[in-house]
Image: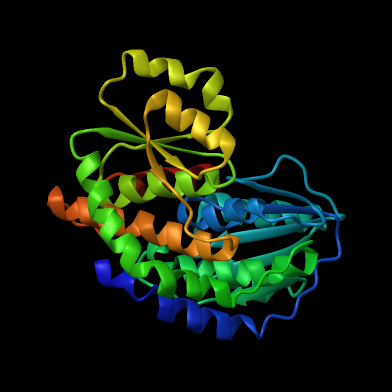
Amino acid sequence: MLEKYLSWDKAFEKSIQASKEIDYEIKTDKIYFSGMGGSYIPGKIAEIFDLNADYQAGNGVPRKLDKSTTLISMSYSGNTSETIFAVKKGLEANSKIIVITSGGYLEKLANENHEIYLVKISGESQTRYSFPYLITPLLKILSTKANEKINLNELKEGITEFKEKFINFSKYLSDKIISKIPVFYGSTYFPIAIRFKQEINENVKYPAFYGYIPEVNHNEVESYVRGKELLPIVIGNEAIDNVTRDVLNAEQIVPPSESKLKNISSLVFLAGVTSIQLSEIYKENPEKLYNIPKCRELTSNIFK
């Protein structure tokens, strides 16, 4: 499974080329992103950027949609119940709707409702391996609302420039995690902390958690008085990140570049490679899922 991450430079190149075909300008001042699991993370990562809009990324169905809101719904499979329900709510509210998917029911829904702008993508066998195909078109669309330059080529450059560095660091990080419960923290790069947690949960079948800096400095840091089995890992090197690092004597992942885009692609790459290193140590098959399919089946009955 490691190869699926090691080939991300090629995946980003392919996705950057495909995104040149996207021709959509967001004209509303409110944007709501809806996605679950690996299809939620790209939307959450977009919060890192300075957007000229009221932008919010959430899980599942938004509480309020209206005609002045652009709803961006992402589901790699196209069959995620919560995301399908969100799109249907968006249609009822006359929201502007963008769907990013590889197919499934969401593609069918978009083809039946021509007011939905469909971005069809390719990808890998699992959503988490397909990150380049998800984040690239999303950032292409959001670039029309960005107050800063978004150069999609930097996503690929983040992999090519820092691949070897982070392959080596992943070995160090996985050794540290063995027999501990990792807890990932971040401020600006908090969405990457969520991603690390997801990758370890799914690929390794292993517990991992995350927390938001500075909120954790007001409560969660106190739990380490007794939580000796926890391994705190701080992602970022801003002054507020370093407070958490110093108090907890935490491991630290320093973003390698001045470019947000390079940091995003390379840090998410690190999360994936580290999880594969751990899956090999624990002799787990990253592809096999035990409990998630059961949750999906039961959830589909709720959102019919």
| Residue 109 visible in this rendered orientation of the protein | no
Task: Answer above or below: position of 293 versus 146.
Answer: above
Q: Is residue 67 left or right of residue 287?
A: right
Q: Is residue 161 left or right of residue 277?
A: right
| Residue 73 visible in this rendered orientation of the protein | yes
Q: Residue at x 56, y 73 (%)?
A: 154
The spot of residue 299 in percent (x, y) is: 46, 44
The spot of residue 189 in percent (x, y) is: 54, 47
Toward the viewer: 144 or 248? 248
Q: Quadrant of residue 206?
A: top left
Q: Quadrant of residue 101?
A: bottom right
Q: Residue at x 44, y 28 (%)?
A: 246
The spot of residue 131 in percent (x, y) is: 46, 65
Q: Residue at x 40, y 16 (%)?
A: 223
Q: Residue at x 28, y 47 (%)?
A: 173
Q: Quadrant of residue 245?
A: top left
Task: Answer above or below: position of 234 versus 83.
Answer: above
The spot of residue 42 in percent (x, y) is: 55, 58
Toward the viewer: 293 or 152? 152
